[in-house]
Image (cartoon, rainbow, N blue to C red):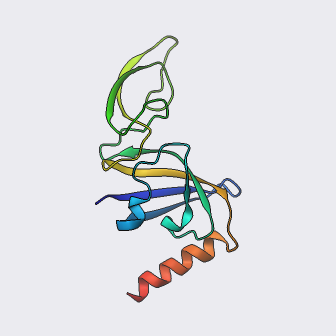
């Protein structure tokens, strides 16, 4: 079973929130691709909609939107996600993950596209209080 850390970016205030997701909630992300929208209930944000923007695997290799599937690929890059050239014309072969979330994915990056009725702080504080009670 997959376990993820989901980093949710709030474009309105520039804040980022990290949530550990396990079990059934983690299964909502399996098979989704970068650019797809997911219900925020999976990370404790009821009524919110999240757009997947990227992520990385257990070894820290980034996901690239232009590579299909969840598998590893060695691609020749001249810039973009996974490689930052230090001089003009520099290229490098880099191993990256595809755009689809799979079992090897460790971190998922997402941004809020639609907001719910309650604020993020209220929802996340309520989740923290529930965990403290256990």
Residue 32's place in the image compared with 41, above or below, is: above
Using the image, determine if residue 68 lies above or below residue 85. Answer: below
Displayed quadrant of residue 116: bottom right
Residue closest to the far bottom: 133
Residue 95 placed where, x, y %?
A: 33, 29
Q: Nearer the viewer, residue 81 or 47?
A: 47
Left or right placement of residue 114 versus residue 23 in this view: right
In the image, taking residue 122 as reference, residue 61 lies left or right, namely left
- Residue sitting at 49 percent across and 83 percent down? 129
Residue 45 lies in what quarter of the image?
Answer: bottom right
The spot of residue 38 in percent (x, y) is 54, 56
Give the image quarter of residue 67.
top left
Question: How many numbered callouts?
Answer: 0
Residue closer to the observer: 91 or 86 = 91
Residue at the (44%, 38%) spot, across then down:
99
Image coords of residue 72 (percent x, y): 31, 34
Is 40 drawn above or below residue 96 in the view shown? below
Q: Residue furthest top?
A: 89
Q: Residue visible at 39% across and 61% down? A: 26
**Quarter of the figure with the C terminus:** bottom left
* Left or right: where 69 falls relative to 80: left
Q: Position of residue 120 (x, y in %)?
A: 62, 69
Image quarter where the N terminus lies is bottom left
Q: Residue at x 41, y 38 (%)?
A: 62
């Amino acid at each position: 079973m997959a376990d993820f850390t989901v980093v949710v970016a709030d474009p309105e205030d520039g804040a980022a929130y990290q949530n550990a997701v396990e079990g059934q909630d983690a299964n909502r992300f399996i098979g989704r691709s970068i650019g797809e929208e997911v219900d925020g209930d999976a990370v404790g944000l009821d009524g919110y909609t999240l757009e997947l923007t990227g992520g990385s695997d257990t070894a820290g290799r980034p996901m690239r939107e232009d590579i299909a599937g969840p598998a590893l690929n060695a691609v020749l890059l001249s810039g973009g996600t996974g490689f930052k050239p230090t001089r003009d014309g520099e290229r490098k072969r880099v191993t990256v993950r595809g755009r689809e979330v799979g079992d090897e994915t460790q971190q998922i990056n997402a941004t809020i596209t639609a907001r719910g009725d309650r604020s993020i702080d209220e929802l996340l504080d309520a989740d923290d209080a529930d965990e403290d009670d256990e």
